[in-house]
Amino acid sequence: MTAQAQLGERLLSVSPSPAFWVALVAYTAASAALLVVLGGHQRARPIAITLVAIAFVAHGVDIGWRGTQHVHPAQSVREAIGLLSFIVTGGYLLASTRYRLTLGGAAVMPVSLVLLVAARLSPAGAAPEDLSSLGRIHISLATIGVGVFALASALSVIYLVEERALKKKKFETLAFKDKGAPLEALDRLSHRLVWVGFPLFTAALVLGAIWVSKLGESLDRPEYPLAAITWIAFASVLVMRQVYGWRGRRAARLTLMGFGAALIVLAIYLVRRMAG
Amino acid sequence: MSELFVVGISWRTAPVAIREKLAFRDEELASTLTSLTASLPVAEALLVSTCNRVEIYGVAKPGQDPAGEVRAFMARDRGLDPSAIGGVIYDHRGSAAIRHVFSVASALDSLVLGEAQILGQLKAAYSVAGGAGTSGPVLGRCLERAFGVAKRVRTETAIARGAANVSTVAVDLAGRVFDLAGKSVLVIGAGKMSTLAARHLRAQGAKHIVVTNRSPEKAEKLAAEIDGIAKPWAELEGLLAEADVAISSTGAREPILTKPLFKQVAKARRWRPMVVIDIAVPRDAEPAIGKLDGIYLYDIDDLERVVAANLAERAKAAEQAMKIVEHEASQFEHWVRSQGVVPTIRALREKFAQVAEAEVSKTLDLLARKEHTPAQQREAIQRLVQLVVNKLLHPPTVALREAAPDEAALRAEVLCDLFGLEPNDQQPALSEASPPDRPGQEASDSLERKAAT
């Protein structure tokens, strides 16, 4: 085997399916189309949403195809990132059936694209170790939980951008002109998503702790306290809102803080994996 | 050919003092149209009378140009001296008239660009003309097309996007913070603008409207007008804590919505968002309350800034809209022009049909006289076709031959164009190729001779 072939195998442990390339093109086109809509061409909106739908379906087919090649979506952090991006796109698609979230889409679609590319084209690292059922459930729950948090965070970002435009009376900005979903709806939706994601993430955390203790590994890795910070941040979002009526800007910032910690955990896993 | 025309005045040319004198009441429209079409060479007519324009759209009878007479008619009908309105009344004919009607329907000629009312007013005027029997095929098609153009302009451009007056901007801003359905509105003071805004909010689904005023009588009166509830001024803090949108327009010299008051209010609301619209001058709200969490404060300058920005956007969109109008008007003009040749086409078809029917009838008579073999029948049909062609071509051929050289060349060119001919100079001269002087006679004689044998 030549050095180049070896490198290729290392980059793409399982060759990407044709659906992956379709998703790649559709994500890129959807991002561009959403920018065109933001530029004032409202007639392009159905095209943009159709492209998002195509990307979502192609992405799903790609995940399914990898399954047929014995690559489980929760087999590794690399695969989990692909699933995470799929969940984010699906959530955006669902939310955009009710609200006009052009600005959000223009921000979320490139993120989904980057995550998908990172999941499929980043170095695969060493072959994944055999995961126990506990490990797979932990990764699955954590991925879905973080995916839901990602959606909540995306809504929080949109909230903060729109809120700033309204509060500071920046009537010339895109955030004001786009006239997306009302602030209250964004805040409510984000809060509901945190409610959905929190039990999943909590279960993932508990199962992860059990899994680690079964493996006999120590708990002094940096990702563990970061995961705890993520949990505390989202728990605070729920408690502070319930007890002290925290909402809006404060809740959005706290949500983003929690998601930031979760992203760092993911990044640590990914880098460690890539380093083999 | 019947030509479309427009005669009228609008906000662009006439002040309200003249517009109101030329305006027609709804109940006068039908009789005016009937009288107009009966007394002037106008085949079809429609009259639109709004606060910003009084216009007659019509179709002239063939060969007539009644615009001047319609101007005089409008003035006389309103009891005015035609010369008194000569400087403000305008008329458009043909393509300019079509473009004007399309622009008016698309609200490109409106005082507030892109406003939605004019389309409804035009539809109503069209309906009145239909009822009076003064709208016909040309005007009808023009108006139907104008409605289609208006729809295109509204959906394909930003002409109707963004609120264009202060009260709707207030509602728009509140709608960016909440879904307005089921929300509570507090009206502080009794300004006209706040009343309008409260009505708009109600239309958007706001559930409770509470009015408070230093004068309980005024509060009661306004509450009755906008289907709200009047509450005592002393309860202001509690009312603010319960409201989602507060619209303030009192005549107070000092701010009544102060930061200390709103700190209490925000706490009582558990920082639920609240929109405060301060339309009063001097302002009712201290600017500092806008810095509190969850409080979105807008004063009259903010609202007017949004209106100005929206109108600027609409003006930009108007350029794009004019292109749509231009394109659609060209197409409609083409259709109108095509209507001018319809009688000629009809006459041509009738003449051709007559010739064909006469020859077919003769041939059938000949064939009926005795039995014919299939070969003879085939020959008879071939001769019939030859006969019909000769007869049809005889008049144009003669006209072509007998015309003066310049005229003949022109006619030849038209014929080539109409029939897609490419004359070959090598072919025999026209005299050699021409049919006999009595078209079809030779062929007909031959057939009759054969039938006799």
Image: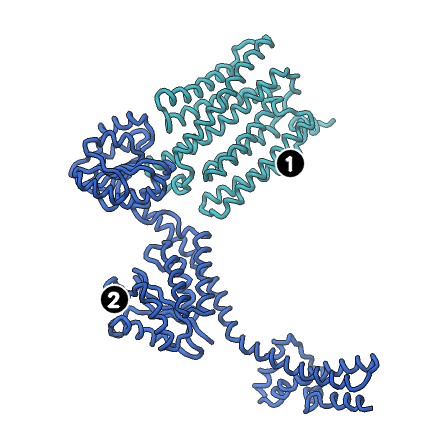
Q: Are marks 1 and 2 on the same chain?
A: no
Residue B231, x across and y down, in percent:
22, 35
User: Can I make out residue B107 in this image?
Assistant: no
Residue occupied by mark 2: B21
Provide the secondary structure element on which disc 1 rests. helix
| Circle 1 crowding by C-alpha within 10 Å: few under 14, some 14–19, many from 20 | some
Q: Output the chain of dot 1.
A: A
Which chain gets the blue colouring? B
Q: Are marks 1 and 2 in contact (CB under 8 Å)?
A: no
Q: Which quadrant does the C terminus of chain A fall into?
A: top right
Number of marks present in the image shown? 2
User: Can I make out residue B399 in this image?
Assistant: yes
Report the disc number at residue B383.
none
Q: Which residue: 76% across, 81% down?
A: B382
CA distance for labels 1 and 2:
71 Å
Which chain gets the cyan colouring? A
Q: Output the chain of dot 2.
A: B
Q: Which residue: 23% across, 46% down?
A: B192
| Circle 2 crowding by C-alpha within 10 Å: few under 14, some 14–19, many from 20 | few
Q: Nearer the viewer, mark 1 or mark 2?
A: 2
Quarter where residue A29 is shown: top right
Left or right for A23, reference B226: right
Residue type at the position of mark 2: Lys
Residue A24, x across and y down, in percent:
59, 37
Quarter where residue A122 is shown: top right
Most foreground residue, B213 or B295: B213
